[in-house]
Image (cartoon, helix red, strand yellow):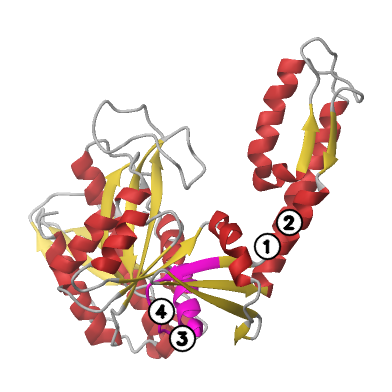
Amino acid sequence: MAHQEDLFSFLRGRWQDLFQAEFEVLLYDLTSTYFECDPPESGKRRFGYSRDKRPDCVQVIIALLVTPDGLPLAYEVMAGNTSEKTTLQAFLQKIEQCYGRAKRTWVMDRGIPTEEVLQEMREATSPVAYLVGTPRGRLSKLEKEFLPRPWAKVKESVEVKLLAREGELYILARSEGRKQKERAIRRRRLKRLWQRLQALQGQGLRRDELLLKLGAAKAEAGRAYRLVEVRVPTAEQPVNAATFTFALRKDKLRQTFRSEGHYLLRSNLCGEDPALLWQHYVQLTEIEAVFRDLKSDLAIRPIYHQKDSRIEAHVFISFLAYCLYVTRRQRLRTLAPGLTPRVVMEKMCSLQMVDVRVPTTDGRLLILPRYTQPEKEHRMLLHQLRLQLPAQPTPKIIQQGAKYVAEVKTL
């Protein structure tokens, strides 16, 4: 890990040479990866907020910085109980040390920066631009100020309102696509919760059993639970349809309808085009895609290491693997649009390297490394990507008396 910062500087140069990447906008986010093991007494493996829905497991936190095209620039492995609000300041300093001071815009999800950090970014000698999501509670406080302002269309199904306030620009966005998605999720959860409550009414439970099952139902329903008013019996009452009742909270439901598809952004780029700011923010999906690729296609989990140095080495190798993965994806966008890195890996994994070992009569071993003959689809893919397989390796003879062995390795 001693050369980590040198690697980050090297990557910037390579992304610029290969893909003419720009670094004015940077996306920053965090994820977690868990370990199915006994809790350690020391080290970075700790219990914390699990983004993998595994609060029963210890974990480490991975902070990642990428460009809007998904090109990774830097990462950091932190203790599993690290609060995301405490990570940004150190990353700002790291990027400044690696790449120097420059005009950059940091795009982050809500919950990462604190008010103090945002104030420091605004008041720095060279102000650092930011665009960050904002909790919905702040939208309620600003609702009256937004009401008289007109909507401006920035895309076919997206409209925004702008509010300049205390040196910042607040952007209220309304998306029809997001509205439909939120409504479908809420309906599904609310329907499942309602069926669960109906089932609990007829199970003849004791009050303590009912409370435990209600806790599980609440955790599963999430925000949908707030739309239902549940009345449970007192300690002296039996559990039946008369003492255990539930009803839809129509006032909360109407309030939810009004906020569907809305989200609030804030930035210190007061003079920027709101359409451009909105476009930068939705590019956060790129960093979410990075995390999905690391956990699915590249299988960063499971991690079996217990020492911090080995855990960091595992993440480092996964990071390098993603650099190769994203390089392939960028090349595919230009040379073979429609193909994904996953499809290419599935196609090419059938092209194998065969290491045939044949013992000779004088006790030595003849090794014939050969890759299998590419099939038609392999040749088409290689041609489209402008790749050429190397010449077959030359045979080798070693002094070893061994029986005939055939080893097959995937290229």
The structure residue drawn at horizontal position 81% and vertical position 9%, both measured from the top left corner, is 236
Image marks 1 and 3: residues in contact by CB distance under 8 Å = no
Residue 228, percent across and down? Answer: 78, 41
Quadrant of the snapshot with the N terminus: bottom left
On whether residue 11 falls in the magenta region, the answer is no
Is tag 2's residue or tag 4's residue first in the polypeptide sequence? 2
**What residue did someone put label 4 on?**
270
Packing grade of label 2 (10 A; few <14, some 14-19, many >=20) is few
Disc 2/disc 4 C-alpha distance (Å) = 30 Å
Q: Taking 34 as reference, is 160 above or below it?
A: below
The structure residue drawn at horizontal position 34% and vertical position 40%, both measured from the top left corner, is 80
The structure residue drawn at horizontal position 49% and vertical position 61%, both measured from the top left corner, is 134
Packing grade of label 1 (10 A; few <14, some 14-19, many >=20) is some
- Per the rendering, the mark at residue 255 is 2
* Amino acid on which disc 3 is placed: Asp
Disc 1/disc 4 C-alpha distance (Å) = 25 Å
Residue 89, percent across and down? Answer: 25, 56
- Please provide the residue range marked out in magenta: 264-286
Left or right, residue 160 beside residue 104 = right
Left or right, residue 152 beside residue 402 = right
